[in-house]
Image (cartoon, grey):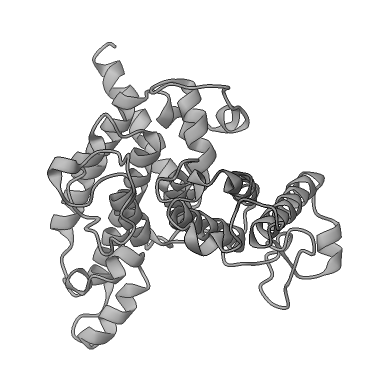
Amino acid sequence: MVLSIGGPATDACRICCAVNDLHLCNVCKVDHYCGKDHEIGDSADREAKCNKVRDTREALHLREQELRDPPKDSVIASNVFENGVGHFWKIVETRDYMQARYAYIMALRRMDSRISVRIALDHVIDMLRLCRRDTISVGIMAPAFYLRLGYDQQAYDFMKGYFTRGDDPEQSQPYEEEPDLSIQGADAFEDPDVWMHQSFDLIHKSAVMLIKLRLLRDLRNLQHWTDSRPQSKIPQEICDEISKYLVGNVVSSRIDIISQGDQSKRITQIQTQVDQLYRSVNDYNKYFWPALVEPKVDLETRAPSHRSGDQGEVQLELRYTYAAWFETPGAIQFIRQKIESAKSVDSGLGV
């Protein structure tokens, strides 16, 4: 069976999933409805989230206006959005604005529409443009946003520039200076050794794991298509075009993979990498995989503080990345099977 490609559903009515004649919610501006009756009849819980998006958006607008049109006696220049690029946070007067923007992103993150994810990601990337050192840590949200939009290659490129120093093996460590966000076309098939380093936390490890799972899915889809298509009856170039619709954007951009018939070698390669990453995450934080499979308590709880390897870290991680896992067909079930398989092995050994 060929699996579907993950990511949020295309923008549709929140109630009935209709895709035609939609309008945006008048309050949050990110959720779609097919009519007023469905908008009015939506849940009270959703209304609170909707109002939060509106309130934080309006607060951000006010803060931005204060910076763009400062009082005559202000110490801040009127062109701070031009002259302050790259070191915004060092200008004390910009901090309320940056914090308001962060609050808006967090409100958007709680919405489920594709447009809310896209807007949140745009704000994250622009905040990194303004403050290259990412003082308030918005960059940790970007990989999950990219993955929710189906932009797996961009997610991997971002992590290579933000969390490591590109391809230099001597500098492969969490980035503490300015990230290099110009990387494009990083090899998502490469060995995951750098990501298994202990200095990388759950957010990095689990995002790479999810990308590798999507690569495994794509390669299996290609193999299924190769095995089932009528041989010699369809021109190769047409087969290649059809293949692109069966995979995500990492594989679809690789004509060398698309045009290759047998994917078994690459499938084995990625399966090995997935197993390595699974063990790496489990060794780093033994609570994460069980919480991903049964997330209810940890999704609703936020520890006041956390340390590497504890339950609080899991709660923070799920807050940012659970939706990307949930929206990837088969991903959580794959982890569930890995957990059950490990339990069977332990039981057989008398552990």
Q: Quadrant of residue 334?
A: top left
- Residue 293 horizontal/vertical position (percent): 47, 34
Which image quarter holds the C terminus? Answer: top left
In this view, 23 is above or below 276: below
Q: Quadrant of residue 249?
A: bottom left
- Residue 304 horizontal/vertical position (percent): 58, 22
The residue sitting at the front extreme is: 73
73 relative position to 138: left or right: right
Count of numbered marks:
0
127 relative position to 204: left or right: right
10 or 224: nearer the eye? Answer: 10
89 relative position to 17: left or right: left
- Residue 126 horizontal/vertical position (percent): 49, 59
In this view, 300 is above or below 254: above
Residue at 58% x, 61% y: name it.
Answer: 119
Asked if residue 342 can be seen in this view, the reply is yes
Residue at 79% x, 49% y: name it.
Answer: 47
The residue sitting at the top extreme is: 350
Which image quarter holds the N terminus? Answer: bottom left
Residue at 17% x, 47% y: name it.
Answer: 191
Residue at 30% x, 70% y: name it.
Answer: 252
56 or 83: nearer the eye? Answer: 83
- Residue 346 horizontal/vertical position (percent): 28, 18
Asked if residue 247 can be seen in this view, the reply is no
Q: Quadrant of residue 242?
A: bottom left
